[in-house]
Image: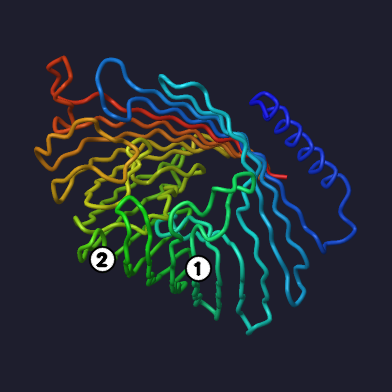
Protein backbone atom coordinates (compact mmCIF):
# COMPACT_ATOMS: atom_id res chain seq x y z
CA UNK A 1 0.00 0.00 0.00
CA UNK A 2 1.44 3.37 -0.99
CA UNK A 3 2.03 6.11 1.55
CA UNK A 4 -0.58 8.34 -0.14
CA UNK A 5 -3.20 5.59 -0.05
CA UNK A 6 -2.46 4.87 3.62
CA UNK A 7 -2.90 8.54 4.44
CA UNK A 8 -6.27 8.61 2.65
CA UNK A 9 -7.40 5.49 4.51
CA UNK A 10 -6.41 7.02 7.83
CA UNK A 11 -8.24 10.23 6.96
CA UNK A 12 -11.38 8.28 6.14
CA UNK A 13 -11.12 6.36 9.42
CA UNK A 14 -10.75 9.58 11.39
CA UNK A 15 -13.74 11.09 9.61
CA UNK A 16 -15.82 8.01 10.42
CA UNK A 17 -14.76 8.27 14.06
CA UNK A 18 -15.84 11.90 14.22
CA UNK A 19 -19.23 11.07 12.61
CA UNK A 20 -19.77 8.16 14.98
CA UNK A 21 -18.96 10.33 17.98
CA UNK A 22 -21.34 13.03 16.70
CA UNK A 23 -24.11 10.47 16.28
CA UNK A 24 -23.48 9.13 19.75
CA UNK A 25 -23.65 12.67 21.14
CA UNK A 26 -26.88 13.44 19.27
CA UNK A 27 -28.84 10.41 20.49
CA UNK A 28 -28.10 8.63 23.77
CA UNK A 29 -27.52 4.88 23.38
CA UNK A 30 -30.39 2.59 24.23
CA UNK A 31 -28.12 0.21 26.13
CA UNK A 32 -25.04 0.76 28.26
CA UNK A 33 -23.80 -2.80 27.87
CA UNK A 34 -21.18 -1.43 25.46
CA UNK A 35 -19.77 2.03 26.23
CA UNK A 36 -17.49 3.72 23.68
CA UNK A 37 -15.08 6.60 23.98
CA UNK A 38 -13.14 8.26 21.18
CA UNK A 39 -10.03 10.42 21.11
CA UNK A 40 -8.55 12.14 18.09
CA UNK A 41 -4.96 13.26 18.67
CA UNK A 42 -2.58 15.04 16.32
CA UNK A 43 1.02 15.36 17.47
CA UNK A 44 3.95 17.06 15.73
CA UNK A 45 7.58 17.01 16.94
CA UNK A 46 10.82 18.58 15.79
CA UNK A 47 14.39 18.03 17.01
CA UNK A 48 17.50 19.91 16.01
CA UNK A 49 21.12 18.96 16.66
CA UNK A 50 20.82 16.07 19.17
CA UNK A 51 24.54 15.31 18.65
CA UNK A 52 25.52 18.85 19.75
CA UNK A 53 27.51 19.55 16.61
CA UNK A 54 28.39 22.93 15.19
CA UNK A 55 27.82 24.12 11.64
CA UNK A 56 25.64 21.75 9.59
CA UNK A 57 23.47 19.83 12.05
CA UNK A 58 20.95 17.01 12.03
CA UNK A 59 17.21 17.76 12.01
CA UNK A 60 14.30 15.41 12.56
CA UNK A 61 10.55 15.98 12.27
CA UNK A 62 7.59 13.72 13.08
CA UNK A 63 3.86 14.04 12.41
CA UNK A 64 1.45 11.56 13.97
CA UNK A 65 -2.36 11.75 13.65
CA UNK A 66 -4.01 9.15 15.84
CA UNK A 67 -7.52 7.85 16.50
CA UNK A 68 -8.01 6.06 19.83
CA UNK A 69 -11.10 3.97 20.49
CA UNK A 70 -11.95 2.45 23.85
CA UNK A 71 -14.84 0.06 24.53
CA UNK A 72 -16.12 -1.10 27.93
CA UNK A 73 -18.30 -4.21 27.73
CA UNK A 74 -20.68 -5.45 30.43
CA UNK A 75 -19.61 -3.03 33.16
CA UNK A 76 -21.61 -3.74 36.30
CA UNK A 77 -21.79 -7.47 35.65
CA UNK A 78 -19.84 -10.16 37.48
CA UNK A 79 -17.18 -10.10 34.74
CA UNK A 80 -16.62 -7.18 32.37
CA UNK A 81 -14.04 -6.23 29.79
CA UNK A 82 -12.21 -3.30 28.28
CA UNK A 83 -10.44 -2.92 24.93
CA UNK A 84 -8.49 0.10 23.66
CA UNK A 85 -6.95 0.39 20.21
CA UNK A 86 -5.12 3.11 18.29
CA UNK A 87 -4.99 3.64 14.56
CA UNK A 88 -2.16 6.00 13.65
CA UNK A 89 -0.03 7.11 10.76
CA UNK A 90 3.57 8.21 11.35
CA UNK A 91 5.45 10.51 9.00
CA UNK A 92 9.13 10.93 9.84
CA UNK A 93 11.88 12.86 8.12
CA UNK A 94 15.52 13.09 9.11
CA UNK A 95 18.32 15.05 7.50
CA UNK A 96 19.79 13.11 4.58
CA UNK A 97 17.09 10.39 4.59
CA UNK A 98 13.88 10.01 2.57
CA UNK A 99 10.58 10.66 4.29
CA UNK A 100 9.16 7.54 5.95
CA UNK A 101 5.47 6.60 6.31
CA UNK A 102 4.11 3.93 8.63
CA UNK A 103 0.58 2.91 9.52
CA UNK A 104 0.05 1.12 12.84
CA UNK A 105 -2.89 -0.47 14.61
CA UNK A 106 -1.94 -0.76 18.26
CA UNK A 107 -3.65 -2.86 20.87
CA UNK A 108 -3.08 -0.78 24.00
CA UNK A 109 -5.35 -2.55 26.43
CA UNK A 110 -7.46 -5.71 26.40
CA UNK A 111 -8.48 -7.27 29.69
CA UNK A 112 -11.24 -9.03 31.59
CA UNK A 113 -12.03 -7.80 35.09
CA UNK A 114 -14.19 -8.60 38.07
CA UNK A 115 -15.08 -6.37 41.02
CA UNK A 116 -16.73 -9.16 43.00
CA UNK A 117 -13.73 -11.16 44.16
CA UNK A 118 -13.58 -9.28 47.48
CA UNK A 119 -15.25 -6.11 48.69
CA UNK A 120 -13.21 -3.14 47.46
CA UNK A 121 -11.07 -5.28 45.14
CA UNK A 122 -10.65 -5.57 41.38
CA UNK A 123 -8.88 -8.34 39.49
CA UNK A 124 -7.75 -7.81 35.89
CA UNK A 125 -6.35 -10.39 33.48
CA UNK A 126 -4.88 -9.37 30.14
CA UNK A 127 -3.16 -6.17 28.97
CA UNK A 128 -3.54 -2.89 30.84
CA UNK A 129 -1.86 0.51 31.07
CA UNK A 130 0.12 1.00 34.29
CA UNK A 131 0.87 4.59 35.32
CA UNK A 132 1.86 6.22 38.57
CA UNK A 133 2.34 9.74 39.90
CA UNK A 134 4.51 11.84 37.57
CA UNK A 135 4.80 8.70 35.42
CA UNK A 136 8.06 8.26 37.29
CA UNK A 137 7.99 4.51 37.87
CA UNK A 138 5.76 3.18 35.08
CA UNK A 139 4.05 4.37 31.93
CA UNK A 140 3.78 1.06 30.12
CA UNK A 141 1.37 -1.60 28.85
CA UNK A 142 1.72 -4.85 30.82
CA UNK A 143 0.45 -8.34 29.97
CA UNK A 144 -0.47 -10.39 32.99
CA UNK A 145 -2.45 -10.39 36.24
CA UNK A 146 -3.30 -7.24 38.24
CA UNK A 147 -5.03 -7.05 41.63
CA UNK A 148 -5.96 -3.82 43.39
CA UNK A 149 -7.73 -3.27 46.69
CA UNK A 150 -9.10 -0.15 48.42
CA UNK A 151 -9.98 0.12 52.08
CA UNK A 152 -10.80 3.61 53.30
CA UNK A 153 -7.72 5.78 52.81
CA UNK A 154 -5.54 2.84 51.80
CA UNK A 155 -4.99 1.47 48.31
CA UNK A 156 -2.76 -1.46 47.28
CA UNK A 157 -1.75 -2.88 43.89
CA UNK A 158 -0.08 -6.21 43.21
CA UNK A 159 0.75 -7.50 39.75
CA UNK A 160 2.82 -10.07 37.94
CA UNK A 161 3.28 -9.34 34.26
CA UNK A 162 5.47 -9.19 31.22
CA UNK A 163 6.35 -6.46 28.76
CA UNK A 164 6.47 -7.52 25.10
CA UNK A 165 4.65 -10.79 25.78
CA UNK A 166 2.18 -10.30 22.91
CA UNK A 167 2.14 -8.24 19.78
CA UNK A 168 1.47 -4.49 20.19
CA UNK A 169 1.09 -3.49 16.52
CA UNK A 170 -1.55 -5.74 14.97
CA UNK A 171 -0.32 -4.86 11.46
CA UNK A 172 3.27 -5.93 12.17
CA UNK A 173 3.93 -9.54 13.18
CA UNK A 174 7.42 -8.56 14.37
CA UNK A 175 6.24 -6.02 16.95
CA UNK A 176 5.93 -6.76 20.65
CA UNK A 177 8.20 -9.83 20.74
CA UNK A 178 11.42 -8.11 19.67
CA UNK A 179 13.91 -8.99 22.36
CA UNK A 180 13.34 -11.19 25.36
CA UNK A 181 10.14 -10.49 27.32
CA UNK A 182 10.70 -8.65 30.59
CA UNK A 183 9.17 -10.19 33.72
CA UNK A 184 7.90 -7.94 36.49
CA UNK A 185 6.57 -8.46 40.00
CA UNK A 186 5.39 -5.30 41.73
CA UNK A 187 3.65 -4.17 44.91
CA UNK A 188 2.51 -0.56 45.28
CA UNK A 189 0.82 0.89 48.39
CA UNK A 190 -0.77 4.36 48.76
CA UNK A 191 -2.28 6.16 51.74
CA UNK A 192 -4.34 9.36 51.59
CA UNK A 193 -2.67 11.31 54.36
CA UNK A 194 -4.87 14.35 53.78
CA UNK A 195 -6.71 16.28 51.13
CA UNK A 196 -4.62 16.25 47.92
CA UNK A 197 -1.77 14.51 49.78
CA UNK A 198 -0.74 10.90 49.12
CA UNK A 199 2.00 8.83 50.75
CA UNK A 200 3.26 5.69 49.04
CA UNK A 201 5.74 2.84 48.87
CA UNK A 202 6.69 0.35 46.18
CA UNK A 203 8.77 -2.76 45.55
CA UNK A 204 9.50 -3.94 42.00
CA UNK A 205 11.42 -6.95 40.75
CA UNK A 206 12.61 -6.93 37.10
CA UNK A 207 14.03 -9.99 35.40
CA UNK A 208 15.79 -10.05 32.02
CA UNK A 209 14.89 -6.49 31.17
CA UNK A 210 16.79 -5.45 28.04
CA UNK A 211 16.99 -1.67 28.28
CA UNK A 212 19.84 0.70 27.65
CA UNK A 213 21.93 -1.19 30.25
CA UNK A 214 21.63 -4.66 28.71
CA UNK A 215 20.18 -7.75 30.41
CA UNK A 216 19.35 -7.04 34.04
CA UNK A 217 17.90 -8.53 37.20
CA UNK A 218 16.99 -5.60 39.37
CA UNK A 219 15.04 -4.82 42.54
CA UNK A 220 13.67 -1.31 43.02
CA UNK A 221 12.33 -0.05 46.35
CA UNK A 222 11.05 3.37 47.28
CA UNK A 223 9.07 5.70 49.49
CA UNK A 224 7.20 8.68 48.06
CA UNK A 225 4.96 11.62 48.84
CA UNK A 226 2.87 13.75 46.48
CA UNK A 227 0.79 16.85 47.14
CA UNK A 228 -1.44 18.06 44.31
CA UNK A 229 -3.37 20.99 45.78
CA UNK A 230 -4.52 23.66 43.31
CA UNK A 231 -3.93 26.38 45.96
CA UNK A 232 -1.09 26.98 48.35
CA UNK A 233 1.64 24.34 48.41
CA UNK A 234 2.20 21.34 46.13
CA UNK A 235 5.13 18.95 46.47
CA UNK A 236 6.78 15.72 45.40
CA UNK A 237 9.34 13.50 47.12
CA UNK A 238 10.97 10.29 45.91
CA UNK A 239 13.44 8.26 47.95
CA UNK A 240 14.54 5.00 46.37
CA UNK A 241 17.14 2.29 46.03
CA UNK A 242 18.06 -0.23 43.36
CA UNK A 243 19.99 -3.47 43.74
CA UNK A 244 20.72 -6.60 41.74
CA UNK A 245 22.94 -7.47 38.79
CA UNK A 246 23.42 -5.76 35.44
CA UNK A 247 26.04 -6.17 32.73
CA UNK A 248 27.54 -9.06 34.66
CA UNK A 249 28.19 -7.16 37.88
CA UNK A 250 26.40 -6.27 41.11
CA UNK A 251 24.78 -2.84 41.23
CA UNK A 252 23.58 -0.77 44.16
CA UNK A 253 22.33 2.78 43.86
CA UNK A 254 20.05 5.36 45.44
CA UNK A 255 17.91 8.29 44.33
CA UNK A 256 16.47 11.40 45.96
CA UNK A 257 14.07 13.69 44.12
CA UNK A 258 12.48 16.57 46.05
CA UNK A 259 10.49 19.58 44.95
CA UNK A 260 7.76 22.02 45.91
CA UNK A 261 5.49 24.47 44.12
CA UNK A 262 3.91 27.51 45.73
CA UNK A 263 0.68 28.63 44.06
CA UNK A 264 -0.18 32.28 44.71
CA UNK A 265 -3.87 31.91 43.91
CA UNK A 266 -4.86 35.36 45.25
CA UNK A 267 -2.51 37.22 42.91
CA UNK A 268 -3.29 38.20 39.31
CA UNK A 269 -2.45 35.42 36.82
CA UNK A 270 -2.02 33.04 39.82
CA UNK A 271 1.78 32.67 39.58
CA UNK A 272 3.41 29.37 40.56
CA UNK A 273 7.02 29.14 41.78
CA UNK A 274 8.72 25.71 41.72
CA UNK A 275 12.05 24.61 43.16
CA UNK A 276 13.37 21.06 42.80
CA UNK A 277 16.48 18.95 43.16
CA UNK A 278 17.12 15.38 42.01
CA UNK A 279 20.16 13.21 42.70
CA UNK A 280 20.71 9.72 41.32
CA UNK A 281 23.92 7.89 42.19
CA UNK A 282 26.17 6.36 39.55
CA UNK A 283 24.60 2.89 39.72
CA UNK A 284 20.99 3.99 40.07
CA UNK A 285 18.59 3.61 37.19
CA UNK A 286 14.84 3.91 36.85
CA UNK A 287 12.63 1.06 35.70
CA UNK A 288 13.21 1.90 32.03
CA UNK A 289 9.42 1.89 31.57
CA UNK A 290 8.77 5.44 32.76
CA UNK A 291 8.07 8.63 30.78
CA UNK A 292 8.85 11.25 33.49
CA UNK A 293 5.96 13.55 32.60
CA UNK A 294 3.91 15.76 34.93
CA UNK A 295 2.75 19.32 35.55
CA UNK A 296 3.64 21.97 38.10
CA UNK A 297 -0.06 22.81 38.47
CA UNK A 298 -0.60 23.93 34.89
CA UNK A 299 -2.67 22.39 32.09
CA UNK A 300 0.05 20.88 29.89
CA UNK A 301 2.24 17.95 30.91
CA UNK A 302 5.94 18.17 30.08
CA UNK A 303 9.19 16.28 30.56
CA UNK A 304 10.09 16.94 34.19
CA UNK A 305 13.84 16.52 33.57
CA UNK A 306 13.94 18.66 30.45
CA UNK A 307 12.15 18.61 27.10
CA UNK A 308 15.34 18.45 25.03
CA UNK A 309 17.76 16.44 27.19
CA UNK A 310 14.89 14.15 28.34
CA UNK A 311 17.23 12.00 30.42
CA UNK A 312 16.56 9.01 32.64
CA UNK A 313 17.36 9.77 36.25
CA UNK A 314 20.61 7.78 36.37
CA UNK A 315 24.04 9.11 37.44
CA UNK A 316 22.58 12.61 37.31
CA UNK A 317 22.00 15.69 39.47
CA UNK A 318 19.36 18.18 38.36
CA UNK A 319 18.54 21.53 39.97
CA UNK A 320 15.23 22.97 38.76
CA UNK A 321 13.54 26.39 38.96
CA UNK A 322 10.13 26.95 37.41
CA UNK A 323 7.75 29.90 37.02
CA UNK A 324 4.14 29.28 36.00
CA UNK A 325 1.26 31.63 35.16
CA UNK A 326 -2.44 31.43 34.38
CA UNK A 327 -2.93 34.45 32.11
CA UNK A 328 -6.59 33.59 31.41
CA UNK A 329 -9.12 30.88 32.30
CA UNK A 330 -8.24 27.68 30.47
CA UNK A 331 -4.65 28.82 29.77
CA UNK A 332 -1.36 28.00 31.52
CA UNK A 333 2.24 28.97 30.85
CA UNK A 334 5.40 27.50 32.41
CA UNK A 335 9.04 28.50 32.08
CA UNK A 336 11.38 25.89 33.55
CA UNK A 337 15.17 25.97 33.97
CA UNK A 338 17.37 22.93 34.66
CA UNK A 339 21.05 22.69 35.59
CA UNK A 340 22.66 19.28 34.96
CA UNK A 341 25.65 17.61 36.61
CA UNK A 342 26.96 14.04 37.02
CA UNK A 343 27.96 12.62 40.43
CA UNK A 344 30.33 10.22 38.65
CA UNK A 345 32.00 11.26 35.41
CA UNK A 346 30.87 8.90 32.65
CA UNK A 347 29.43 8.98 29.17
CA UNK A 348 25.91 10.39 29.12
CA UNK A 349 23.42 7.53 28.80
CA UNK A 350 19.64 7.28 28.58
CA UNK A 351 19.05 10.77 27.15
CA UNK A 352 17.49 12.10 23.95
CA UNK A 353 20.66 14.13 23.39
CA UNK A 354 23.58 11.95 22.24
CA UNK A 355 26.75 14.07 22.14
CA UNK A 356 29.13 13.23 19.31
CA UNK A 357 32.01 14.27 21.54
CA UNK A 358 32.50 14.01 25.31
CA UNK A 359 35.84 14.96 26.83
CA UNK A 360 34.82 13.52 30.23
CA UNK A 361 36.41 16.59 31.80
CA UNK A 362 34.33 17.80 34.72
CA UNK A 363 31.00 16.96 36.30
CA UNK A 364 28.95 19.73 34.66
CA UNK A 365 26.84 18.75 31.64
CA UNK A 366 24.99 21.94 30.78
CA UNK A 367 21.75 23.86 31.19
CA UNK A 368 18.23 23.48 29.84
CA UNK A 369 15.29 25.85 29.41
CA UNK A 370 11.71 24.84 28.57
CA UNK A 371 8.66 26.87 27.58
CA UNK A 372 5.33 25.06 28.02
CA UNK A 373 1.88 26.36 27.06
CA UNK A 374 -1.44 24.65 27.72
CA UNK A 375 -4.93 25.56 26.51
CA UNK A 376 -8.10 23.70 27.53
CA UNK A 377 -11.21 25.73 26.62
CA UNK A 378 -13.53 22.79 27.33
CA UNK A 379 -13.48 19.18 28.49
CA UNK A 380 -13.59 18.07 24.85
CA UNK A 381 -10.48 19.83 23.55
CA UNK A 382 -6.95 20.35 24.81
CA UNK A 383 -3.82 21.77 23.21
CA UNK A 384 -0.24 21.52 24.47
CA UNK A 385 2.91 23.19 23.18
CA UNK A 386 6.45 22.75 24.50
CA UNK A 387 9.79 24.07 23.28
CA UNK A 388 13.13 23.19 24.84
CA UNK A 389 16.75 24.25 24.61
CA UNK A 390 19.86 22.48 25.91
CA UNK A 391 23.14 24.40 26.10
CA UNK A 392 26.05 21.98 26.69
CA UNK A 393 29.03 22.65 28.91
CA UNK A 394 32.57 22.84 27.55
CA UNK A 395 32.91 19.13 28.28
CA UNK A 396 30.44 18.12 25.55
CA UNK A 397 32.36 19.15 22.44
CA UNK A 398 33.62 17.17 19.47
CA UNK A 399 37.39 17.57 19.05
CA UNK A 400 36.91 17.22 15.28
CA UNK A 401 34.94 20.50 15.07
CA UNK A 402 36.72 22.87 12.73
CA UNK A 403 36.16 25.98 14.83
CA UNK A 404 37.63 26.75 18.23
CA UNK A 405 34.34 27.14 20.10
CA UNK A 406 34.45 26.36 23.80
CA UNK A 407 31.41 24.08 23.70
CA UNK A 408 29.21 22.03 21.39
CA UNK A 409 26.26 23.42 19.52
CA UNK A 410 22.85 24.19 20.99
CA UNK A 411 20.22 21.41 20.85
CA UNK A 412 16.55 22.35 20.52
CA UNK A 413 13.21 20.56 20.40
CA UNK A 414 9.55 21.48 20.00
CA UNK A 415 6.26 19.62 20.01
CA UNK A 416 2.55 20.35 19.62
CA UNK A 417 -0.28 18.05 20.65
CA UNK A 418 -3.97 18.61 19.88
CA UNK A 419 -6.57 16.32 21.45
CA UNK A 420 -10.30 16.06 20.80
CA UNK A 421 -12.37 13.91 23.19
CA UNK A 422 -15.69 12.48 22.07
Give above or below for 295 relative to 417. below
Residue 64 x, y percent position in the rendering:
57, 34
Q: Seen in the image, is 253 located left or right of residue 11? A: left
Of 186 and 200, the residue lying toward us:
186
Viewer-nearest residue: 153 or 157: 157
Give the left or right position of residue 282, taking residue 226 as reference: left
- Residue pointed to by mark 2: 245
Residue name at image x 18 percent, y 26 percent? 398
Label 1, label 2: how far apart the Cα atoms are? 20 Å
Residue positioned 46% across, 48% down in the render = 297
The quarter of the picture where residue 228 lies is bottom left
User: Residue 320 falls in which quadrant of the image?
Assistant: top left
At mark 1, the secondary structure is strand
Q: Which residue is mark 1?
A: 161
Q: Residue furthest bottom?
A: 118
Task: Name the residue: 40% across, 70% down.
Answer: 199
Q: Secondary structure at mark 2?
A: strand
Furthest residue toward front: 173
Note whether residue 378 is visible.
Answer: no
Q: Nearer the viewer, residue 225 or 56?
A: 56
Q: Which mark is residue 412?
A: none
Quadrant including the N terminus? top right
Residue 383 in the image: x percent, y percent?
A: 57, 36
Counting from the top left corner in percent of width and height, residue 248 is at: 23, 62
Amino acid sequence: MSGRHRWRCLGAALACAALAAHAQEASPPESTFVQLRHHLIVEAKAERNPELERGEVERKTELEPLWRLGATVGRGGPVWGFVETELLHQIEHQTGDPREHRTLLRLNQAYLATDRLLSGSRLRVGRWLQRDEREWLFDENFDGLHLEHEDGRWQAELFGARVRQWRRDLLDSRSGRRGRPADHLAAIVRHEAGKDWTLGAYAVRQHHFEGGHGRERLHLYGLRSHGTASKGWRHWAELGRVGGRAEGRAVSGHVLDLGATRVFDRVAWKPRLTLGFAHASGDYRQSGLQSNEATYGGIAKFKIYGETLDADLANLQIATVGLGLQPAPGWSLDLVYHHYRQPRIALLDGAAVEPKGDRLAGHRLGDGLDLVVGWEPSRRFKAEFAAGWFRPSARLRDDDDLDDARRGGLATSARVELEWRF
